[in-house]
Amino acid sequence: MKYCAHCGHEVELRIPDGDSRIRHVCPSCGAIHYQNPRMIVGTLPVWHEQVLLCRRAIEPRHGYWTLPAGFMENGESAAEGAIRETLEEASARVEVIAPYTMVSVPFIDQIHLLFLARLTDLDFAPGSESLEVKLFSEQDIPWNELAFRSVAMTLDIFFRERREGRFGVHHFTLQPVPVAPPGTA
Amino acid sequence: MKYCAHCGHEVELRIPDGDSRIRHVCPSCGAIHYQNPRMIVGTLPVWHEQVLLCRRAIEPRHGYWTLPAGFMENGESAAEGAIRETLEEASARVEVIAPYTMVSVPFIDQIHLLFLARLTDLDFAPGSESLEVKLFSEQDIPWNELAFRSVAMTLDIFFRERREGRFGVHHFTLQPVPVAPPGTA
């Protein structure tokens, strides 16, 4: 951010009075431009013993498999956003059962919220952001071709809990993946 | 938003290619300025049979009682934000137990996420945004002086579940309060 969205003047980086963090502040009109984490909402669509995954047609992680999810929009509830994303990415209709995993990803300023959901019919198809949409049984999940850690952890928890016959609500925080220093194995 | 935060040019309202919603788009540099819901994170701090409430020193709802909560910041997890807000508003230290209520408030583009938490000591005091911080037993909760519906519903669920001895995770969506048409009672 370089310019004030309200008046067009160049913004400054400083700590506003009564605040403790550096913000983008407009020295002309006084506007403070806060930046906050964004919510990614989606579903884990379940059909009997199988779950629905989408193969991404867009970056990041083009070609990798994911659960249908995307940025929550203004004017919708979290569950409405999750249902909309499932329809957009997989042309699939679901009934939301309950919030299932809530994953904070602080190093990219995101929260991923995935709802356990019931697929209501088999009339699904790739949306414009998917190459392929497919039902997978546990033994067929492409674990090495999953797009995001929050998706892999959600699927792992789901199949474990399904065996136990009891579904909880899970929250956890991802840390950045350590990168090996050059020259190490 | 009137001006592009990247280049300072006046923005237009239009639906970008491949999108289905009206966005602020810069005709000069092409930037699309998405606006997304913001997360309010906080805690329900519990001390034996009592819960900690703060009386607000700021608008909206100046003078009304609330749970310690505020806007989640970039670079923190939801639980870290909730702990930070509890420290800022009530100078209180808590251990987070679990996510408790998640309330979508689509008409103001917010999600309220409150964690069940354990107050670790009684050394609390009003922060700069609170007039007063106090422990309340169920029979003393100022139900008619609570600041927000999400707070009232969270407290109501908490005391009910405490009697049942079992705490769940709850998500719901608030609708705008209907305003009575002029001339009606």
Image (cartoon, coloured by chain):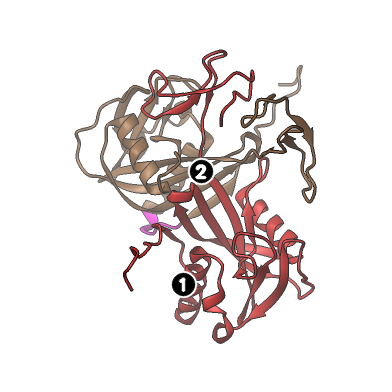
Chain colours: A brown, B red
Name the residue nearer the viewer: A170 or A1: A1
Chain at numbered mark 2: B
Q: Which of the two discs, 2 and 1, labels the residue nearer the N terminus?
A: 2
**Quarter in which the N terminus of chain B is drawn:** top right
- Quarter of the image holding residue B138? bottom right
Return the x and y of residue A98 as percentages of the image width and height: 38, 54
* Residue B4 is one of the magenta-drawn residues: no
- Bounds of the magenta segment: A163-168
Tag nearer the camera, 2 or 1:
2
User: Which element type, helix, strand or loop, lies under badge 1?
Assistant: helix
In reply to whether residue A164 is colored magenta, the answer given is yes
| Residue B150 pos. (x, y %) | 50, 63
Residue B21, percent across and down? Answer: 39, 30
The residue at which mark 2 appears reads as B37
Q: Which residue is mark 1?
A: B157
Q: Is residue B92 visible?
A: no
Q: Is residue A80 left or right of residue B165?
A: left
Q: Is residue A136 above or below residue B126?
A: above
- Residue B117: name its quadrant: bottom right
Q: Is residue B131 above or below residue B171?
A: below
Q: How many marks?
A: 2
Label 2 Cα crowd, 10 Å radius (few <14 / some 14-19 / many 20+): many
Amino acid at circle 1 = Ile
Mark 2 touching mark 1, by CB under 8 A? no
The percent position of residue A46, horizontal first and vertical second, equals 30, 44
Return the mark for residue B185.
none
Label 1, residues with CA under 10 Å away: few <14, some 14-19, many ≥20? some
Indicate left or right for A183 with A119 as reference. right
Q: Residue at x 66, y 70 (%)?
A: B55
Residue sticking out furthest to the front: B183
Secondary structure under tag 2 reads loop
